[in-house]
Image (cartoon, rainbow, N blue to C red):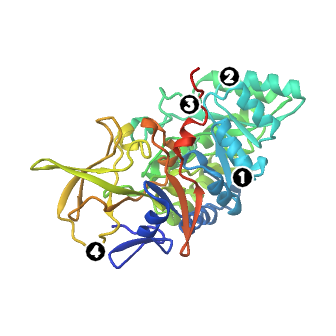
Amino acid sequence: MKLFGTMEVKENTLYIGGVNTEELRKNYGTPLYVMDEVAIETQMQTFTTHFSSNTFESRVLYASKAFLNLYIAGLAKKNNLFIDVVSGGELFTVLRAGFNPKKIYFHGNNKTYDELNFAIEENVGTIILDNQYEYEMLNGLLNEKDKTQRVMVRVNPDIDTDTHKYIQTTKEDSKFGFNMYKDETMTFIKTLEADDRIDFVGIHCHIGSQIFDDASFYLEAKKMAEYAKQLKEALGREVEEINLGGGFGVYYTAGDTPLDLTEFLPKYTAHIESVFQEYGISPKIVSIEPGRSMVNNFGSTLYTVGAIKKMAEDLTFMLVDGGMNDNMRPAMYEAKYEAYLANKMNEAPSAHYKVAGKLCETGDVLIEDVQLPEAAPGDLLITPSTGAYAYSMSSNYNRMTRPAVVFVKDGETKVAVRRETYEDLIRNDEVME
Ligand SMILES: *Cc1c(COP(=O)(O)O)cnc(C)c1O
């Protein structure tokens, strides 16, 4: 097993943050999301330390949709990160966590009137416009409130990344942003530039997710620099900020080869500096938006094994007490995970299991095939590397209560999100009279 962050094995049992996973089960139940606080803070610092330039101000925005609650927003704040949100709910959460509104970037490909209104009321630092309609609503709101707003535009450089099509975002047919190569986009930006209520500061793009190939990021930086040069010519001034998005790939299973951030980020920075020079531009600020790479490997999910069902010589189901409601990625895009028995860490793998959940869908399979020690009901299964897009995509399907989220550090455990109760499930329901 790849031991991420503070994971260690003691007496056949897995520990995270100095806490015994069996103790976690005993005290908080399963399924349970376990976040390694020291490792997450270290990762935040890895980003801010290694993405740093002498020629521009570098900003690291945590893409909060990967994993968001008050606790992680607090950690991002403590570590001097900026943060991006894509909905009113995410915005509300980070504001409640005490984030400085000026450090918030508001994304989203179809922000509603109410969300824009909320953002303006709260003086959110930067709004990234995705389409003309949003601009019209924004313009109306700013006039009404007699305010101005810092704005960027999401552009789409049409880069083919080697990732699953559901998480590719800049192909021509993607729903996000403005095509960089269409005249309308430049016309739109000129409209913004002429609007006194809008402080147009620059361009943003995000080329997709789970990208391992550094060449994609270098190409992206080049295309953005090229576009910034065109803007400089068209507007007669420099753009102030270029936001290059996130998408840095992470390890899930053998064969995944993530970029080594301490090596890649300085190279990336140098590359950005050199393409800026090549195109004769000098934006003051360059930002990146890691989501998955900030948290994924530092979060795990614990499950209790229930029934073990042998269906055929080569097919044995291991059924766990959660499933697609706490991690929908395998069902949604065939995402792969590893699993281990956290209470049998030193036993040799000797059996194959198909790990499935307890939800009423044939597709509720967490892992197609995993080799584990001989398992029995009551064992403690862990799926590591579920820090990103598991909790944040969780649902109440089958009226499952969402698991608790705990942060572990130096032998101590803090509940960041308490486990939902049955009462929570009907909290907003009305009784039929
Ligand atoms: C999802 C998203 C990110 C983060 O992507 P990761 O793959 O999690 O790093 C960053 N920026 C935008 C605009 C996004 O939509």
Specify whether 241 is left or right of 40.
Answer: right
- Whether pointer 3 and pointer 4 mark residues with C-beta atoms closer than 8 Å, the reply is no
Q: Residue at x 47, y 26 (%)?
A: 173
Ligand 1: image quarter = top right
Specify whether 297 is left or right of 183.
Answer: left
Confirm or reject: label 3 Cβ below 8 Å from ligand 1: yes
The quarter of the picture where residue 20 lies is bottom left
- Whether pointer 1 and pointer 2 mark residues with C-beta atoms closer than 8 Å, the reply is no
For disc 4, the marked residue is 346
Tell me the crowding category of disc 1: few under 14, some 14 to 19, or many 20 or more residues within 10 angstroms, Cα based: some
- The furthest residue to the front: 433
Of helix, strand and loop, which one carries label 1?
loop
Counting from the top left corner in percent of width and height, residue 383 is at 38, 57
Specify whether 199 is left or right of 187.
Answer: right
Q: Which numbered disc covers residue 132?
A: 2
N-term mark: 1 or 3? 1
N-term mark: 1 or 4? 1
Of helix, strand and loop, which one carries label 3?
loop
Separation (CA) of disc 3 from disc 4: 47 Å
For disc 3, the marked residue is 176
Separation (CA) of disc 2 from disc 4: 58 Å
Kind of residue indicated by mark 2: Gln
